[in-house]
Image: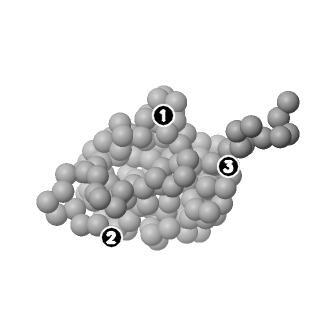
Amino acid sequence: MASRQGAQPGLSQPDGLCVYQYFQVQTNGHAVVVQLHGASQYRSLYAGEMEQELGHLADFLAGKRVIVDFGRLPYCCTAMIGGLLRLRNRLRDAGGEMVLCSMTPECRQAFTMLNLDGTVFAIYDSLAEALERFCPPQEAVGDASSP
């Protein structure tokens, strides 16, 4: 995991990752994958910092397809859910889309209890499934089956 020490939020690194304190951002095919990390950091104490990073991220991702990967996050808090809702709204307003994936049962239950699972957010079991369903391969140009 890349260290934030000495780096500015969103600073691009040679390996194609952007460095943030609360997540990593990487392009994967036709989508941008945001990998959440640092479970102990997702407390209301850090909500302002996380909100600032999500705001910067929203500017960077305007109009893109975004997959938020919870694979490194054992639980989530209301501050994070609120930040993700605001990120989703900003992306949608700019013509982008966002889905979630790889949640623990406890985290998914929080989204279900808030009536966000399947209504506000499409949530997939794995990153592979999210990539397959959210970003299907585009048809080949000049395909023989085209009229």
- Where residue 145 appears, as percent x and y from the top left, is 85, 39
How many numbered marks have been drawn onto this rendered protein structure? 3
Mark 2 falls on what kind of element?
loop
Position of residue 35 in the picture relative to residue 12 (left or right)? right
Closest to the observer: 74 or 132? 132
Mark 1 / mark 3, whichever is N-terminal: 1
Residue at image coords 46%, 53%: 27
Mark seen at residue 137: 3
Q: Would you say the residues marked 2 and 1 are in contact, meaning their CB atoms lie under 8 Å apart?
A: no
The amino acid type, in three-letter code, at marker 2 is Met
Residue annotated with mark 1: 63
Q: CA distance from mark 2 to mark 3?
A: 29 Å
Q: Would you say the residues marked 1 and 3 are in contact, meaning their CB atoms lie under 8 Å apart?
A: no
The amino acid type, in three-letter code, at marker 3 is Pro
- Where residue 28 appears, as percent x and y from the top left, is 51, 55
Mark 2 / mark 1, whichever is N-terminal: 2
Mark seen at residue 1: 2
